[in-house]
Image (cartoon, helix red, strand yellow):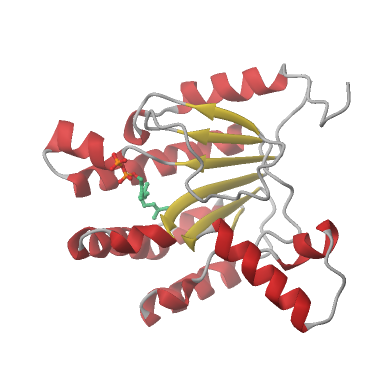
């Protein structure tokens, strides 16, 4: 049986859940953060060592200003109020994406949260923030070219944000939408993909465990027979 080392999640459906249940997209995001906390705990329980969450894409800047502000406030709240608990539970925080576009205050919080938790070993929580896969790949190729290094899979792996992190074994996308939305296109090339109808705020530990158990039974042959 295969145990997953890395689960990546596209947490889709907050907005629709919020409109349906609270008449507000932003309250859907707030409920989504509660699911984030639950799923972090379940990840540890299931002994998975890396969890990547797509929290803000390069395309999310196109949303209304007030929604962007709400999402950034939630991120700031998470970094300030939850970091101590993450740290106590042995969680290492790692950010992937171009965070230079975020307000300075958040950049400082991101940096200090990563510094504080860098030696933790129980779980690596990878937050994708202002992340876009195509720009990540282009950026890697530019860096390789500048350094005059040979372009191959190995060198590209080394210049992606995910350097040193095993590729996701599992990708979960909630929200009843079957697409990748510019998320980890390179790293997901052999991942098992699970599309879930539930909106992210309704996704729970049982749904998650069911996916992990299903994954464990899959025979993965990576192109061989
Ligand atoms: C996609 O749902 C979700 C996001 C763009 C944001 C995800 C953010 C959170 C779960 C909360 C903050 C998380 C952290 C870790 C601080 P959508 O808004 O596109 O949903 P829709 O498709 O129904 O509109």
Q: Residue at x 48, y 21 (%)?
A: 206
Locate residue 133: give its quadrant.
Answer: bottom right
The vertical placement of 53 against 152, above or below, is above
Left or right of 150 on screen, residue 158: left
Which quadrant is home to the C terminus? top right
| Percent position of residue 23, x then y | 11, 39
Front residue of 28/176: it is 176
Marker count (numbered)? 0
Left or right of 31 on screen, residue 215: right
Q: Residue at x 83, y 26 (%)?
A: 221
Looking at the image, can residue 94 be seen?
no
Looking at the image, can residue 138 be seen?
yes
Which quadrant is home to the N terminus? top right
| Percent position of residue 58, x then y | 43, 62
Q: Residue at x 64, y 62 (%)?
A: 137
The vertical placement of 167 against 172, above or below, is below
| Percent position of residue 160, x then y | 68, 63
| Percent position of residue 153, x then y | 82, 57
Q: Residue at x 30, y 61 (%)?
A: 62
Residue, far left:
23
Front residue of 207/194: it is 194
């Amino acid at each position: 049986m295969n145990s997953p080392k890395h689960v990546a999640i596209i947490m889709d459906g907050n907005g629709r859940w919020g409109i349906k249940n609270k008449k507000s997209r932003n309250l859907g995001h707030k409920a989504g953060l509660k699911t984030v906390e639950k799923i972090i705990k379940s990840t540890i329980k299931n002994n998975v060592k890396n969890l990547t969450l797509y929290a803000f894409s390069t395309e999310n800047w196109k949303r209304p200003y007030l929604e962007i502000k709400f999402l950034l406030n939630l991120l700031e709240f998470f970094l300030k109020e939850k970091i101590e608990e993450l740290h106590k539970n042995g969680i290492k925080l790692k950010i992937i994406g171009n965070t230079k576009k975020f307000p300075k205050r958040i950049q400082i919080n991101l940096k200090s949260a990563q510094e504080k938790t860098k030696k933790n070993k129980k779980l690596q929580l990878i937050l994708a923030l202002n992340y876009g896969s195509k720009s990540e790949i282009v950026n890697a190729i530019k860096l390789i070219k500048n350094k005059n290094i040979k372009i191959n899979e190995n060198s590209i792996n080394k210049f992606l944000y995910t350097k040193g992190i095993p590729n996701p074994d599992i990708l979960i996308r909630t929200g009843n939408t079957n697409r990748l939305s510019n998320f980890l296109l390179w790293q997901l090339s052999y991942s098992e993909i699970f599309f879930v109808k539930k909106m992210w705020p309704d996704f729970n530990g049982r749904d998650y465990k069911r996916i992990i158990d299903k994954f464990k039974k899959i025979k993965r042959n990576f192109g061989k027979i």
